[in-house]
Amino acid sequence: MRIVRFDPRIKIEIAVIGIFIFTFSSGAVPVVNGSINADYTGIHEPISSSEYRYVWEEGMETILNITPLNSDIFYYDIDSGAGGEIMNIDIGDPAQRTIQLNKVTYTTTTFNISFRYRQFGNYSAIGFLGEKYLAAYTDESKIAEKPVNLLNQRILSKILIDENRNHSLKEGRTLALGAEAPGGDYALHASNVNTTSGTAVISIIRNGIGVYQKIVRPGDTVIYERAVDKAYAVNGYENESQRYFPAFLPVMAVHVDSILTENGSAAVIIDGIFQLSDVYTDIDPEYGLLGITEVTEKSITMKNRMNANLSISDNMDFVNVQGTYISPIYLMNNIRLKTANSKILRFFVYDEDMPHNHERRGSVYSRSSPVMAWDGLNFPGFWYDIDSNLFSEELEITNISGRKIPRGSLRYITGVRSPFEAAGIKGSEKHGLNVSFMVFGIGTDKYVAINGKSAELSRILLEHTGSRYDKKTLAPDEAWELGEGYNLTVRSLEVRDNPRRALLSLSHHGTVLKEDWIPAGSFFSYSEDVSSDRINPPKFFTYLDTIFVGCCFDMAQFRYTFLRSDDIKRIQKGDRMGVFRVIDVEPGSISMENDIDIYLRPGSHLNLIGNLSFRVADANELRFYPSNTKGQEISEEIDEVPEVDSMNQSPEVSETQSRYDEPKKVSGFEIVLAIITLSALCVFRRKRK
């Protein structure tokens, strides 16, 4: 046997090559000082127009205009186009990082709108801090005996229900209505339903007690008036200030469509409901940084009463126990301003009380503002990181004809290299968290690449952000259901140690995967074995933030929790996903385009992929926006599209080959990398000689 011995210099050269290959081909890239090298971040060039964004950064016009058309923190009705809230922020000199006095202006104006059940007439509504309120009953409001203007008295009433859907209220049954703390729980009850005489008794119940009843026939309207004598601030506290309250105000209207027998039971069919909160909202002059400067019968105006400093503070410790972050600025009640932890001034305004299941709305396409491209800067349904200015997805319409988006004219690109929220926290490096991974948003769901391949994705089931509200508190022996059968349990707490410790147990369908004592201020993680030489993201990790000691029981608080799915989604070129066909799979991105024509019919809610959809106005004018809610599945209609759909043909069709089998292009980056590598080796060999 011949033994080949390597020259030590060759070994070094091979090692250098190995370092280059690993550094630039691995699925993970180290995070240095919490930043990411922009060369390897996947898609990161915005395609949205700056005038339609809710995010402001240096280089844009110095006045940011926030409206319902570019921000979903304000009320907007897509069908009527109603929504009168506007916030203007004059940044002035960005180098000063200060918003001067009276340079933030919030104005909201009333709009006349019809009740959803149109026979009720019209009323005057107003958007206020993102919610819809009744400003006034007008001469056109048929459910009110006379006009009543609440805004004149600096009070409003929140609209809880305004609908024209059918409800079947069977004999002896109740229909739950809207509830608004500190008001009561309301319900409708049907009794004495007689299909022969066509009569029934409708009762209105509040907190389990009947407060009103009426004998009804088909076509009748039940109107419940209430003497309201209390006003609460937006934050929920009762105001002591004196207000003029109308003697009685119609707070509920219910229209009876018919009385019939349904599945053997007598029932009352209701086809229109309008309900107000039974407490007023006081327009308090102070809401935080902003204060009310003017109230008219048709508008409310606020301005900032002091300067707002947007500088980075070294002693801020709101979201990261080790880093330096910006404290969000209270503008008014639940509306805040979030500034990036960056040398580049960047910020956006958000609603901190927005529920996780709230529909996120992208910039609205209309005749006056034809938005054709969306990314993380103008659609909050896409993942976006304000510190790095990175986002996960791009959606672009390249051609639209009337209400039709032709086949191949809607492009969807996803892929971004992102660090974990926990990167940079003390101890995170021991658990492999100080690296970034390729993240893909598919239909607004978030996936992470496995084995360093964009074609193998694992959905992120749980990911707590750095927000101080994103946390979980557990008592001893309490199990936290994480998803897909995974549970985290606090077995025991040792509060006499310094630091305090917790015995944590991670299980899957009852089988314990890992159990260990963890001190407060430390990570607990679990990684599964994957047959790959790549660095893979962990299956699960959480940060034991603190352990509380109580008089009756102790508790552990967790932050930065992360869990990814066991199921692996494998994607390859030519795959059909929703309305899209995958046209390219690169290490840092996945590109798709629509494989069928898309018709934006009035009132439709069209599903594109996953939870990504288009919501279209039920109106003659074309208006629509991308949404993070699942809509109706789209199928190509043969009668409107007579040509044969090539995707149903054999793979040998030339059109399919030309679209999906384009020659592989070598990126300029790969060429430069090869040149740098060879140059380094040449210099090394010359020095050796």
Image: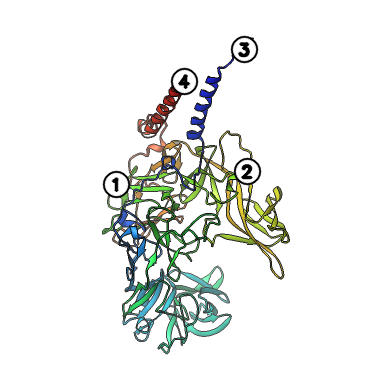
Q: Could you tell me which residue is drawn at 63 percent across and 41 percent down?
A: 528
Residue closer to the observer: 627 or 671? 671
> SS of the residue at dot 3?
loop
**Res. 174 image quadrant:** bottom right
Q: Nearer the viewer, residue 536 or 627?
A: 536
Q: Earlier in the sequence, mark 3 or mark 4?
A: 3
Q: Mark 1 points at which residue?
A: 399
Q: Using the numbered discs, state the Cα–Cα distance from disc 4 to disc 2 in whole angstroms.
A: 41 Å
Q: Which image quadrant: the N terminus? A: top right
Tell me the CA gap for discs 1 and 4: 55 Å
> Secondary structure beneath disc 4?
helix
What's the residue type where badge 1 is placed?
Asn
Label pair 1/4, CB-CB below 8 angstroms = no
Is 165 positioned to the left or the right of 112 in the image? Answer: right
At 35% across and 30% down in the image, what residue appears?
654
Please give the name of the residue rendered at 33% of the width and 44% of the height, measured from the top-left corner: 409
Q: Name the residue under label 2.
A: 527
Residue 180 coordinates in the image, percent (x, y): 50, 75
Would you identify the image quadrant in which residue 133 lies? bottom left
